[in-house]
Amino acid sequence: MMNQIELSVPYDNGYEPDEYMMQEDEWDRDLLLDPAWEKQQRKTFTAWCNSHLRKAGTQIENIEEDFRNGLKLMLLLEVISGERLPKPDRGKMRFHKIANVNKALDFITSKGVKLVSIGAEEIVDGNVKMTLGMIWTIILRFAIQDISVEETSAKEGLLLWCQRKTAPYRNVNVQNFHVSWKDGLAFCALIHRHRPELIDFQNLKDDPLGNLNLAFDIAEKHLDIPKMLDAEDILSTPKPDERAIMTYVSCFYHAFAGAEQAETAANRICKVLGVNQENEKLMEDYERLASELLEWIRRTIPWLENRVAEKTMVEMQRKLEDFRDYRRMHKPPKVQEKCQLEISFNTLQTKLRISNRPAFMPSEGKMVSDIASAWQGLEQAEKGYEEWLLTEIRRLERLDHLAEKFRQKATNHETWATGKEEMLSRKDYESASLMEVRALLRKHEAFESDLSAHQDRVEQIAAIAQELNELDYHDVASVNQRCQSICDLWDQLGTLTQKRREALERTEKLLETVEQLFLEYAKRSAPFNNWMEGAMEDLQDMFIVHTIEEVQTLIAAHEQFKATLPEADAERQAILGIQQEVLKISQNYGIRGDLTNPYSTITTEEIAIKWDKVKRLVPQRDSALQEELARQHANERLRRQFAAQANLIGPWIQTRMEEIGRCSMEMGGTLEDQMTQLKQYEHVIVSYKPNIDRLEGDHQLIQESLIFDNKHTNYTMEHIRVGWELLLTTIARTINEIETQILTRDAKGISQEQMHEFRSSFNHFDRKKNGAMDSDDFRACLISMGYDLGEVEFARIMMLVDPSASGVVSFQSFIDFMTRETADTDTAEQVIASFRILAADKPYILADELRRELPPDQAEYCISRMPPYSGPGALPGALDYTAFSTALYGESDL
C-alpha cells in the first residue's frame, strides 16, 4: 500500500510539518517566511511545473495566479500521473474555480496524501504559501517519494544516491540538500559521473558561481533539465532552500534513471555469468576426476579378480608383495580422491541450488552412485584376494615339502631296488650244491621279507604322488612318470620273486643242509636294517609347524624315539652276536670255504655304518627342533607386538568415530567454532597416521614370517585399514557438511541465531540421534514451529525435502526448506530483463553493446555462447540473449 503523506497547513503563519514531513524534512516556520527561500521555491517550483506542462503545450508564469482557476492544476496532475481527472468546470465564477481546485485536491488525496487544514479557497485566493506547500506536496509524492536506494526511500534514498555517485570525487562531500551544493561541485560531479564527456571535472576551479552556472547550463542544454535555480540566489543565502535543491536534484535522478537501470542490469548479468562460469569449472573438474577414478578402478578390478595361481613360491610371494604395495601406496590416495569427489559434488549441488540453477547431472556412468557402485565392485574383487594369495602360498609350501619327501623316498627305494631284478632273474641254483640251493632259498626268503617291508614304502610313494596330483603340483608329470616306473618295477619284482621261490622250492627237495645261524642273522638283520633306514628317514624328515605347541609336540616325539635307542642297541648287539657265533663255529669245527652269509646282503659293517649315522642324526635333529622352537618364539613375539598395537589403535579409531558423531549432533557455538573444533579433530587424526604405518610394518613382518593367525587380538590389519579409511572419510564429510551449512547460511542470509534455532529444533526431533528425522518426527517439528499442516500440504513439503522418497529428512534439506521461501535468487526472467535494458529494449543485442556494458572477460563469454538472433529486423551479428538466458537456467550440457 502507498505511504500516506499528511500535509497540515495552518491559515495564519504558513506551513506546519505533518507526521510524514517531520520524518522527511523539518521545515522551520520562521525560515518559511524568509523572502530568499520563498524566491528560490517560487522559481524552482515554477520551472518544475513547466517542465511537465510543456508536454501539454502550455506553461505558467506566476505560480500563485495561474493555478487559481484549477484548470492548469488539474492538467499538471494529469501529465505527471498519466491518469484522467474528472471533467473541469468551464465557468469563471468563484465556485467554478473552487470546484476545479477541489477536484485536483481530491485526486492528490486519492494518491495517499492526507491534506489537513488546506482548502481550495486559499488556492483560489492566491495564497502564495499555501500554493507553494501544495506544489511541494505534489513534487514530494510524484518525483521523490518513489526513489529507493538500498532499502532507503524518498529524501534518504535521494541523498544516499547522491553520496554514492559523488563518492569518487575527493573535493565533494554531500551531507544535506542545502550547503553541500553551494560550491557547484556536487552538481558538476553528478553530471561528470554519468556524462564525463560534458564536463572537464579535473580542471574545475574554486569558482562556486562559475561551477553552478556551468552545471545549470549543461543540464538545460544536454540533459533536458530546465534551469530551476539561480546561482546568485544560492550563493546569497547562508543556507539555500532545501526543498528547491531537492526538487532540482530529483530531476537529475530521473534523468539518469535509464543509466542507473543499465548499470544495475549489467551488474546482475555479471553476477549471474560469474556464478555460471564458476559452476561450469566445478562440473568440468568433477567430470575429469570421476573419469580418472573410474578408469583406475576399471584397470584394477581385473587384476584383483585374476585368481590364476603361479607355479612357484617365489612367484606367488611376488604377487603378495604387489598386493601389499597396492594396499599401502596405491589405494589410500584413491580413497581420498573418492571422498573429495563426493565432497566436491555436494558443494557444487549446494551452489547450484543456492543460485537457483538446476541440479548438476554428470555424464552417464559418472554419477556419485556410479562411482560408489564401481568402488563397491573394487572392494568386492579385493575381498578375499589376500587370503587367496596366502592360501596358495601355503599350498605351494606343502607341495614343495611333499615333492621333496617324494624324491627322498623314491631315491631310497630306487637305490634299494637297483640290481634286484637282475638278481631275481639269475639261474645260479641250477648248478649249485644242496648247501648252496638251501642257502639260495633262505636268501630268497630273506629277500621276500625285505620285499614285504618295502611294500609300505612303495605305498607311501604312491600316496604322496596321488596327493601331489590332487594339489595340482606344477611338475606333476615327472612325479607321475617316476612313480609309474617305481610301481612297474615293483610289480616286476613281485612276479620275479614268485617265480624264483617256485624254482627254489622245487630244488629244495634236493638240498638238506641249512645253516640256521645265517638264516637267523638274515631274518633279524633285515628288519633291524629297515628300522635303521626308517629311523634315518624320520630323523632327516622335513617338518612344517606354525605354533610353539606344534614344535613342542615334535620334540616330545623325538624324545620318545631317543628312549628306544637302548633297546635297538641291544638288538644290534644280538645280531652282531649271531655273526660272531658263525665265526666261532667255523673256527671250532674247521669249516672251510666262503663264510659269506648266503641269506643276507646286510653285512655287520653296513649295520655299523648305519648305526653310526643314526647316532649322528639324533643330535642334528635335536638342533633343528630347537632352532624351530626359537623361530616359533620369535613369531609369538611378533604376534604379541602386533596385538598390543592393534588393541590400542582399534578402540582409538572407534572412540574418534563416536566423538565425531557426538560432535555433529551436540556441538554448540557458531558454525565457524564447529569448523575449528572439527579441524582440531582432523589434525589429531592425521597426526595419528604414524601409528597406522608402524602397525603396517609389524603386519608385513608377520606375513613375511608366514604367520597366519593371532590369538592375542580380534583385530586384523584389514579391520584396522577399513576403520581408518572410514574415520578419514567421516571427518572429511562432517567438515564438508559444516562448510555447506556456512555456504547456505551466507548465501541465504541466515543469522547465527537462526542457525542455532534450526539445529536445536532438528536435534530435538531427531529421536534416533542418527542425523535425520523420519516423516513423523518432521511433521511434529513443523507443528512445533507453528505450521498448520493438512495431509496435502505436508505431502507437498515432503516432496520438497525428500524428493527421492527415502522417508528421512537430512539437516541440509531441513535448512533448505526453512530458507527457501525467503531466498532472493536470480531467475531467467530477471536476466532477460537486464539484457533487454542493455539492448535498449531490442529483442536482440550486438557484440559492441556487450563489450561496452560488461567487463571484457564476461562480454567475450556472452559473445562466444549466445546463438545468433533469427527474429525479424535483426541486424548482422545480432545475438539472441533470450535463448542464452534461458539456457543458463536449463539443463547443463555437461
Image (cartoon, helix red, strand yellow):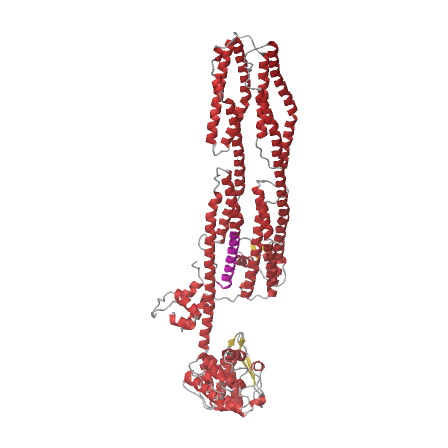
Q: Magenta: predominant secondary structure element?
A: helix
Residue occupying image coordinates x 63% and y 39%: 633
Between 330 and 761, the one lying in front of the other is 330
Q: Quadrant of the C terminus?
A: bottom left
**Residue 285 forms part of the magenta stretch:** no
Numbered label tally: 0
Between 591 and 15, the one lying in front of the other is 591
Q: Is residue 581 visible?
A: yes
Between 52 and 112, the one lying in front of the other is 52
| Percent position of residue 35, x then y | 54, 92
Residue 179: quadrant of the picture: bottom right
| Percent position of residue 188, x then y | 47, 83
Along the horizontal axis of the image, is 621 left or right of 187?
Answer: right
Residue range of the region highlighted in magenta in the rendering: 333-356
| Percent position of residue 693, x then y | 58, 50
Between 156 and 673, the one lying in front of the other is 673
**Residue 337 forms part of the magenta stretch:** yes
Q: Is residue 178 visible?
A: no
Residue occupying image coordinates x 51% and y 33%: 471
In the displayed structure, 355 sits above or below 539; it is: below
Residue occupying image coordinates x 59% and y 46%: 698
| Percent position of residue 515, x then y | 57, 11
